Image (tube, grey):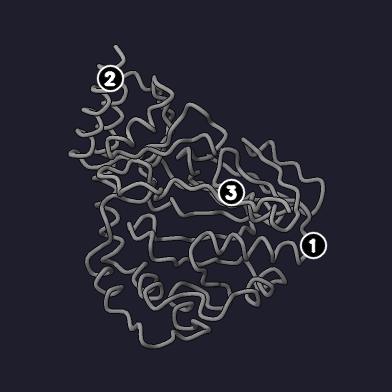
Amino acid sequence: MNAPMLPEHGGPDEGPPAAHDFSTNASPLGPPPTLMNAVQAADRQAYPDPNYRTLRRHLGDADLVLPTAGGAEGIRRLTLAAMLTGRREVWVPQPGFGDYALAAQALGLPVKPYAAPADIRPTAPALVWICEPCNPTGASVPVWPQLDALVVIDRAYEPLRLHGDSPALPPGAWQLICPNKALGLTGVRAGYLIAPAADPVWSRALSLAPSWVLSAEGVAMLMHWHSDDTQAWLAKARNQLREWTAQQRSMLARLDWLQRPSCTHFWLARPPRSDIATRLRERSIRVRDATSFGLPGWVRVSAQPPASQQALQQALLEIESEDS
């Protein structure tokens, strides 16, 4: 029997909790107080409405919104719906979130990696995943062309865009919205898909949803996602993240880290030592090794508060001293 294909994430490992976690690309600022109060007050003793009609109307056109148990469940469900409606290959960004490829491989669909939009050349009815801005790079494509495929834009990091404008989406594209990254609530698994039309793919994706796909906490989070309080809080959070990102980039540059451009608070960096992730973990500091993204020698880091930045700098100086 073949070994199962398992996703590789940069989240909790088997060691003790890290005192300073630079590996996550969720916001380090935590959730807005009003939204968090609503999540904590959610009625856990009652089932949510299994059809989520009120929630779907709140999020947009109720006939085009599909709640999901976070981004990963949405990716799996929509990939299956795409296959059942005739798609025969799946294009994924490289480097990119591994679940796009895993969802396709689990169904026996060929996976086609691409580095730039010009690389996407479907040879059969295709599903194309776009992550905008992209994880793990934090990069953004200014203009996406129209593609002859079922296109899905993963917009989990759009609320964390710190620089530049959002690009125009390809006409007829689906959208996958996952607010928990920007809200610092990754443990609340809730998101939603927005379909361009109630077509056969939408019908399939709707029928494939498990009963009560969202918990009461997930419903509460999404009900407050578009509120004025939440959006004002996010605007202030982006201002703070711009400041912390600039400070952290400057510090790493002084320590000879090579760093790629990014429009978000996370980015790819190449430290001068290949074993830096392991050695930092020994000091209760975690960065995301990028080997699983196809980038050995690189790590993904995210901007963290000044106290964590100081701890990271001190640890790096200690490692440098040990090696000198």
Residue 197 position in % (x across, y down):
64, 69
Residue 88 position in % (x across, y down):
78, 55
Mark 1 and mark 2 in contact? Answer it, CB < 8 Å. no
- Which amino acid, mark 2? Arg
Quarter placement of the N terminus: bottom right
Q: Earlier in the sequence, mark 3 or mark 2?
A: 3
Mark 1 secondary-structure assignment: loop
Q: Nearer the viewer, mark 3 or mark 2?
A: 2
- Which amino acid, mark 1? Gly
The residue that label 1 is drawn on is: 86
Residue that appears at 36% across and 70% down: 221
Q: Earlier in the sequence, mark 1 or mark 2?
A: 1
Mark 2 secondary-structure assignment: helix
Dot 2: few (<14), some (14–19), or many (≥20) neighbours within 10 Å?
Answer: few
Looking at this rendering, what residue extends furthest in the top direction? 324
Mark 3 and mark 1 in contact? Answer it, CB < 8 Å. no
Left or right: where does residue 87 sit relative to residue 297? right
The residue that label 3 is drawn on is: 130
The residue that label 2 is drawn on is: 254
Residue that appears at 28% across and 18% down: 320
Q: Distance between the residues labelled 1 and 2?
A: 52 Å
Q: Is residue 189 above or below residue 287?
A: below
